[in-house]
Amino acid sequence: MKDKILLIDDDEDLVRSLQVILESKGFLVLTATDSQSGLIKLKEEKPRLLVLDVMMNTNLEGYNLLHVLKKDPEYRKMPIILLTGMADALGVNLYSAVEDENLFPNVRFQDKPVDPSLLIEIINEMLPT
């Protein structure tokens, strides 16, 4: 059975390209372009891993979804890769918060643009066997 991954990002070109790459590596990739539709897919489809953009319709939309998910016992341990292309533009150091294993267990922060081979490597490291 293929590992199911949910990719939530408002950059449709990035979503399509990552979907093709990840599917070529044997993953089943679900997509959403905002946190609201992503949360619906997450609950309906139950993916094993989430790749989540920080900045979508609002500057911290993905980060806010991360907070919601990690407070929910059902998603607390879910592996999440947080993507951002604007690490310093917000004036907020999200890295230190995300890297706090007590606050956000099983979360990795990755700058955009992300090298697809690096993303695959991170996904393989984070997915429980």
Image (cartoon, rainbow, N blue to C red):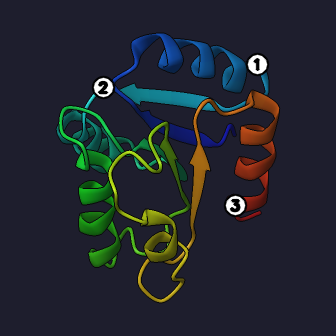
What amino acid type is highlighted by mark number 1? Ser
Q: With respect to residue 53, does 9 lie above or below?
A: above
Question: Taking 4 as reference, is 69 left or right?
Answer: left
**In the rendered image, which residue does mark 2 sit on?**
33
What amino acid type is highlighted by mark number 2? Thr
Disc 1 and disc 2: Cα gap in Å?
21 Å
Residue at point 57% right, 71% down?
106
Expressed as whole percent of the image width and height from the top left, the position of residue 58 reads 18, 39
| Mark seen at residue 126 | 3
Residue at point 77% right, 63% down?
129
| Mark 1 residue crowding within 10 angstroms, few (<14) / some (14–19) / many (20+) | few
Disc 3 and disc 2: Cα gap in Å?
23 Å
Say which of 6 and 98 sits in front: 98
Q: Quadrant of residue 28?
A: top right
Q: Residue furthest bottom?
A: 102
The mark that comes first in sequence, 1 or 2, is 1
| Mark seen at residue 24 | 1
Where the N terminus falls, by quadrant?
A: top right
Q: With respect to residue 121, does 65 lie above or below?
A: below
Say which of 1 and 118 sits in front: 118
Disc 1 and disc 3: Cα gap in Å?
19 Å
Q: With respect to residue 88, does 58 lie above or below?
A: above
The mark that comes first in sequence, 3 or 2, is 2
Say which of 70 and 82 sits in front: 82
| Mark 3 residue crowding within 10 angstroms, few (<14) / some (14–19) / many (20+) | some
